[in-house]
Amino acid sequence: MTKLQKVNKGEVFLIDDDAAVRRGVAALLTAADYTVSIFTSGEEFLSEMGSLDIDDAALLVDVCMPGIQGLELQEKLNRDGVDLPVIVMTAHGDIPMAVRAMRNGAVDFLEKPFTVDEVTTSLERAHAISRPVIKGAQKASPELCKNYDSLTPRESEVLRNVVDGSTNKEIARSLDVSPRTIEVHRQNMMSKMNAKSFAELVRMAVALDIGD
Amino acid sequence: MTENTLEELDGSFANQILETVDTLVVILNRHGEIVFFNRACQLLTGFNAGEALGRKVWDFLILDEEIDAVRGAFEALNAENTPSHFINYWKTKDGAPRIIEWSNNTLKDEDGAIAYILGTGVDITESKSKEAALYESKSFLRAIVGASPVAIITSNEKGTILSFSRKAEAIFGFKENEALGQNLTLIIPEPDRLRHDQYLNHYLETGERRIMGKARQVTAVKKSGERFPVVIHVNEFHDGVRVFVGFIEDLSEQKVTERRLEDVKNQLQHIGRIGAMGEIAATIAHELNQPLTAAASLAGAVSLTLRKVEFPQRDDAISHLNETVSEIRRASEIIRQMRDFMRKRKTAKSLHDVNHVVEEAIAIALIGAEAGGVHVTTDLGANVGEASLDRIQIQQVVINLIRNSIDAMQDAEKKHLAISTAKKSRFIEIKISDTGHGLSDDVKKRLFEPFFTTKEEGMGIGLSISKSIIDAHQGEITAIEKESPGVIFSIKLPVGGHDKAAKSQ
């Protein structure tokens, strides 16, 4: 474990198997005034967890790693009752995994590569959630339910498929329409749901308990 | 001997015997005239003793075309005094020919000179005609067997080939004389080759019919070593001894079947190519995305740092860095599109009999492959049952593993490929075991990594695809090192398909 300077926006435990990614993301978080502890694997994190102060900390973990994968680590922490907000980092192919992580209680997921704003927004959410007051904030709000009810059957079908990780092309094939049609449905659905990003849409879907 | 002696014979006890036996007894004097014509002769010919005595046999009993031959035999006996056997026709009073087999001998006078010729004969007309009929029906049968479009092979209880039809010659490439006397295992490939005797004995001992009386699709082997699919129908009959007869149809000859197999192969290859492209694309996307992530993060870090200091071109620098991040994101997006474009098709699972799926995969993997001296054994467990799987994908994995095993044994002294299935409590296991060169520690670590290969012409995609296919089935694929040289690849699939607990440990 490498510990970088302590400022005061809170602590981040960063786990990724790629050295360059660790270095880059740690530099970014440090510049954004977070304290960063770096781990090269889930195993390393677990072996040192006993000596870590997990209050006011968040876990930023890659879902796809050799050894213990992000999801397994998250499930183990859940089982052990460790109260640590989790953000998962995914590569392109891992949408279904991201959805599973969210369902398992992850605060958010970040698609690599991410911007400064995306990662800091997620971390702010994470640190807010770790304060008991905001716990349970992930339940669907009445407004979210209203938005969801305004979708046409086709649009909600597209929503379900999108959060399952299907591409437009795959959805088009399974619904037997053109990819262009799906694109239109998808845009309409995103704006009706008032979702600004895919990650936000997945978060909503999890709150609404939609999808696989 | 004089006329008197015959008269003496006439009333004697011996004469009474000669009169009652069924055997034809005729005695000629040196001129060929009949001096004795027993009751059996009279019954057969319809001539009574009075009509026959004193006449020469060739004057009234012999067919015209045989007269010379019979006279010749008579002269020879008269001169040489050697006993002889002779078959010729006698014609009866009403003209019907009878076939008689004769034993001829001479009777001598006190001086030792030939006095009479004695002929004893048996009417073999009935048995001769039976034999002729049998001969005719046998050649009729031979003609049918020869003309049959289905290969016909007969064997005895020991499996020794008794007949090998023309079509069998055409299908298997062996001439009849190469096949006769050989064991049936001549045309049976491994692994059944070694077990055939066992199968035969099992049937002979228990009478339990496994393939007897049923049409069954099996793999046969030609003289060239090429394996090919056949339908075989075995039956038995008794011809004094027990004989097995096999009717064999070459399936590879049937265009329809050929096309179907070809289709399956093409389908597998196509899926394989798409799978390979998808795998390559996914790997490149993932591998490229990591440095892009690092780069975007570093640029973000610098941008954040710059916000904390003051210098004239700071805002320009920050905006350039933000543009850098956008461009990195664009690159990542392009890669994502490429990956989505070549994405592997989704796994289409349904319930399949695992043994059947594996059997088919073995057949496809081995057909067309040079036998190469590889001894193949299969041990498909009873009650393995069904699993929810994508048949084509799982077959692709099994075929891939079999081909790898065969490749690995190319230079091995002992080439034994063993394929087995078994049902364990929570999963079904398929094992493919070889006696090849095994895996070094380095290879073992990187076995399932994309683009890792030990083959000169390999892409390093096969095992990587296999792993993603098995992962998509919530299963597990592992390589187990054997104590003796070689590797066992194990595929574990969840029972019933919905049980995610297939990861056994």
Image (tube, helix red, strand yellow):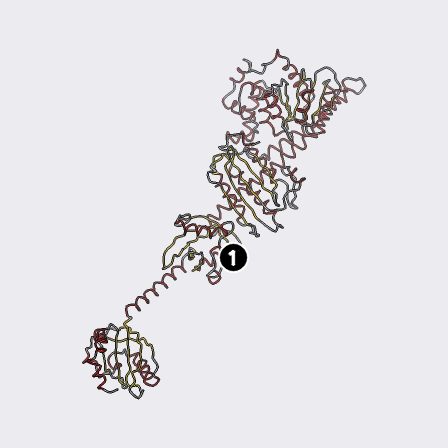
Image mark 1: chain: B
Is B398 drawn above or below residue B67 in the view shown? Answer: above
Residue B273 spot, x, y in % from top left: 58, 40
Identity of the amino acid at label 1? Lys
Q: Which residue is drawn at 81% across and 18% down?
A: B311
Can the viewer see residue B456?
yes
Q: Residue at x 56, y 20 (%)?
A: A206
- Local SS, label 1: loop
Can the viewer see residue A201?
no
Q: Is B83 left or right of A40, judged from the image as shown?
A: left
Q: Is B255 left or right of B398, judged from the image as shown?
A: left
Residue A145 spot, x, y in % from top left: 53, 16
Q: Residue B276's image quarter?
A: top right
Residue B33 spot, x, y in % from top left: 25, 84
Mark 1 sits on what residue?
Answer: B223
Residue A33 spot, x, y in % from top left: 73, 17
**Residue nearer the viewer, B152 or A45:** A45
**Residue nearer the viewer, B489 or A9:** B489
Is B248 drawn above or below residue A31 in the view shown? Answer: below
Q: Is B317 left or right of B388, judged from the image as shown?
A: right
Point out the image quarter for the N terminus of chain A: top right
Q: Which residue lies furthest to the right in this view?
A: B311
Is B340 drawn above or below residue B111 in the view shown? Answer: above
Q: Are there few (<14), some (14-19), or many (20+) residues within 10 Å of tag 1?
A: some
Is B302 drawn above or below residue B200 in the view shown? Answer: above
